[in-house]
Image (cartoon, grey):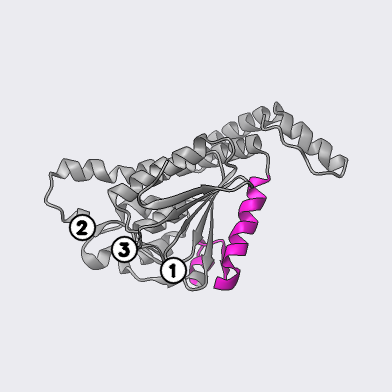
Amino acid sequence: MPYATLRYDVAESGVATIALDHPETRNALSDELLDDLLAAFAAARDDDAVRCVVLTSTHEKVFSSGGNLGGFAADVPLVHKHFATQRFPRLFVLIGELGKPTICAANGHVLAGALGLALACDLIVATEGATFGTPEINVGVFPFMVMALIYRNVGRKKTSELLLLGERIDAHEAQRIGIVNRVVPAEHFDAAVDGWATTLASKSPVLMKLGKDAMFRQQDMAFADALELLHASLTVAFATEDVREGVTAFFEKREPEWKGR
């Protein structure tokens, strides 16, 4: 289906690319863009040909400037604003429950609500020129919707610094504190993203789904509950054909032929 604010493409490798494409607003996360993201990620989830999703931007300098500030001051009933902002948690949960690995290819600045969108992905590859931050406090707002994701990825004191001061950090500092997995020069950025995406897409789809589901569900469980869930997940994994194929291929020194079941 066509999208008004983003581009969606699936390569033969099984890598789906979702590229934010609303440059006139610096990819501000408007209701329309969020709806397109929800639809695109749902399409990737439901397409068996998709093995990995890359989220990026067509803008030369900006991944996304964050939430649409015009909506904060809009003269509409409060309940309408409440329902509109529900798109953020729906999107974060959808990405977490996608059952397929996701990479945020941060080819530009990642600000405000967009930081939550990036952190909802499994991995973040950033170009050296990218910056990260939650500047909402500087315009009398607060990064409520992304706070939970930042706290789950960054230490508490550094998270407080980001939220309260509203300052930007560069890509290397973002990597140091745990936001970014890898920082690469602009000329090597596309190759680095494609390398990881292709590798992820080559894995067993059924084991990847079982693993991704377990990762998302156990992250905030009590230790004993997490172990119980993971034990059950391991038992289910033993029942798949792909476990047997993977082990057999290892001993036979060949590439596995995944069945996806």
Label whose residue precedes the other's in the sequence (3 or 1)? 3
Q: Main secondary structure of the magenta part?
A: helix
* Residue carrying label 1: 60
3D distance between C-alphas at marks 2 and 1: 23 Å
Q: Place residue 250 in its image quadrant.
A: top right
- Along the horizontal axis of the image, is 218 left or right of 40? right
Tell us which disc is closer to us: 2 or 1: 1
Q: Position of residue 29 (x, y in %)?
A: 32, 54
- Along the horizontal axis of the image, is 74 left or right of 3? left
- Nearest to the observer: residue 3 or residue 109: 3
* Circles 2 and 1: CB atoms closer than 8 Å: no
Residue 70: numbered disc:
2
Label whose residue precedes the other's in the sequence (2 or 1)? 1
Q: Position of residue 94 (x, y in %)?
A: 44, 40
Q: Secondary structure at mark 1?
A: loop
* Residue carrying label 3: 24
249 vs 235: above or below = below
For the N terminus, the image quarter is top left
- Kind of residue at disc 1: Glu
